[in-house]
């Protein structure tokens, strides 16, 4: 027979764990909302930059910039992997690491020199296991990446790209598509390829409808503004990678903790049932003992 | 863009919006805004013609009545449309919170950076220019 007291102890410990997972779920929900707000604030900036590019394109400017053009030969590449510092978030880190690992193997064949940079403890540990040593590691990106911190990285990449020490920058992170869908991706950030808003601007220019009729003065010149727009949009895109990763991490954690809490609920239920049965069984057997004793005395 | 158009300025005054990637720093009406453009300061008063400008490192001054607010902006862009001045910058720091001591030591460190190729020289010059602009503003505040 199962010991009811042992069952009760197990049930208690599961209840405690459930309390923890439930709290973590609530915290993740709150953080997710905050991270979403930050992403929305960043979107205001991105949208304006996009609009600016559209205006430049409308003005009939030839858009060319060293950051937009691919180098003929890629000698040195950097892969930045964005993971989280903490676990308890389901497959979040595993997915990013798997995607990054695949890309690392491809890049090793294509590019003579490859540096891997990793943000987040989980990524560092996960890739170390696969024999990848990171040239740079970052632990200070938590659920609220600050622009200053990302700017530091971005400026370093831009400077390295300008001096020819870097020909290609790729970022592996979890892209936030919607609250129910986040996918691990590898994106090429340098060379930048194209600017967002360019096509819209060009499409609008012949029609020159509505707001397109506004004649802007460009100070000092459209070319000079373009010179600044391109690095800025790179920085913003890198910042967005970090924001996306932060939002996705919180969502992943919330989902994982929710599943854990529900599982704990199920376990408590089945353990309670088992416990009650065991207790009842014991009472019944004790009663039988007493009755047996009475019977024995009678005869 | 559509969103920007829907916000209109109060009559007779400008509306000044300062946006950084992290947040909207400032969104209020103003009588006069001085923008630190790439090649010199530009004053914007009511009914200014539409313009897009590249910002340098320097002081953004916003006057509302007799009150003047100063910010250090770290490059970026300014757009003036329909009496709305939008400033897009990576950093906007209120002048009061600049620290002369810290900036001076940073400037000293940045001046020592190697500059043996044109690219490195450009990087050094940029950092030094940023620090100098911060210092100018910090001393004034």
Image (spheres, coloured by chain):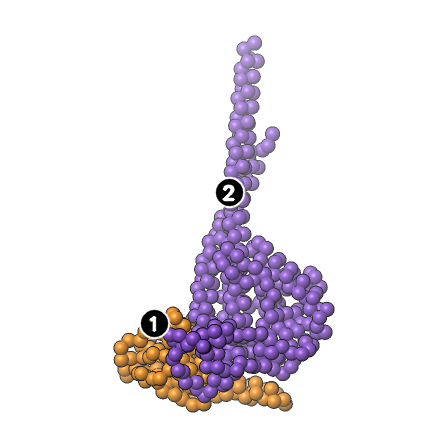
Chain colours: A purple, B orange
Tell me whether circle 2 and circle 1 mark residues in contact (CB < 8 Å): no
Residue designated by label 2? A265
Graded by Cα atoms within 10 Å as few (under 14), some (14 to 19) or many (20 or more), the crowding at tag 2 reads some
Q: Position of residue B70 (x, y in %)?
A: 37, 82
Residue A181 visible at all: yes
Furthest-top residue in this view: A299
Residue A139: percent from the left, percent from the top? 58, 67
Residue visible at 34% across and 72% down? B7
Q: Position of B125 compared to B16: left or right?
A: right
Q: Quadrant of the C terminus of chain B?
A: bottom left
Disc number for residue A164: none
Residue A236, compared with residue B133, is above or below; it is above
On what subunit does the disc labeled 1 rest? B
SS class, disc 1: loop
Residue A169 location in percent, x, y?
Answer: 62, 73
Give the residue number, with chain letter if any, for mark 1: B7
Name the front one of labels 2 and 1.
1
Q: Position of residue A149 (x, y in %)?
A: 53, 73
């Amino acid at each position: 027979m199962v010991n009811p007291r042992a069952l009760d102890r197990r049930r208690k410990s599961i209840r405690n764990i459930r309390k923890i997972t439930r709290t973590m779920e609530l915290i993740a929900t709150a953080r997710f909302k905050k991270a979403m707000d930050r992403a929305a604030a960043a979107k205001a900036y991105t949208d304006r930059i996009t609009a600016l590019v559209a205006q430049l394109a409308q003005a009939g400017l030839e858009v060319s910039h060293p950051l937009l053009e691919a180098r003929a030969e890629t000698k040195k590449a950097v892969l930045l992997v964005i993971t989280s510092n903490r676990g308890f978030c389901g497959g979040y880190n595993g997915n990013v690491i798997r995607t990054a690992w695949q890309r690392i193997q491809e890049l090793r064949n294509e590019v003579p020199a490859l540096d891997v940079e990793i943000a987040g403890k989980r990524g560092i540990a996960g890739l170390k296991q696969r024999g990848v040593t990171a040239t740079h590691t970052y632990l200070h990106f938590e659920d609220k990446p600050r622009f200053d911190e990302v700017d530091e990285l971005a400026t370093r990449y831009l400077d390295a790209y300008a001096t020819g020490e870097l020909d290609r920058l790729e970022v592996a992170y979890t892209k936030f598509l919607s609250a129910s869908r986040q996918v691990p991706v590898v994106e090429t950030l340098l060379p930048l390829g194209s600017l967002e808003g360019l096509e819209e601007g060009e499409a609008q220019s012949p029609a020159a409808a509505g707001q397109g009729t506004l004649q802007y003065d460009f100070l000092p010149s459209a070319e000079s503004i373009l010179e600044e727009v391109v690095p800025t949009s790179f920085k913003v895109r890198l910042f967005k990678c970090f924001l996306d990763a932060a939002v996705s991490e919180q969502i992943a954690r919330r989902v994982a903790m929710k599943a854990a809490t529900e599982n704990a609920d199920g376990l408590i239920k089945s353990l309670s049932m088992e416990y009650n049965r065991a207790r009842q069984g014991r009472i019944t057997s004790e009663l039988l003992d007493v009755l047996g004793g009475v019977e024995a005395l009678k005869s | 863009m559509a969103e920007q158009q829907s916000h209109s300025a109060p009559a007779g005054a400008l509306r000044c919006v300062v946006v950084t990637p992290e947040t909207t720093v400032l969104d209020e009406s103003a009588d006069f805004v001085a923008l630190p453009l790439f090649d010199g300061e530009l004053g914007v008063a009511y009914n200014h013609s539409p313009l897009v400008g590249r910002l340098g490192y320097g002081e953004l001054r916003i006057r509302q009545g007799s009150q003047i607010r100063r910010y250090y902006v770290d490059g970026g862009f300014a757009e003036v449309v329909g009496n709305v001045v939008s400033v897009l910058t990576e950093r906007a720091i209120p002048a009061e919170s600049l620290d002369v001591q810290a900036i001076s030591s940073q400037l000293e460190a940045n001046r020592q950076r190697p500059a043996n190729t044109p690219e490195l020289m450009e990087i050094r010059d940029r950092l030094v220019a940023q620090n100098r602009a911060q210092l100018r503003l910090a001393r004034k505040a």
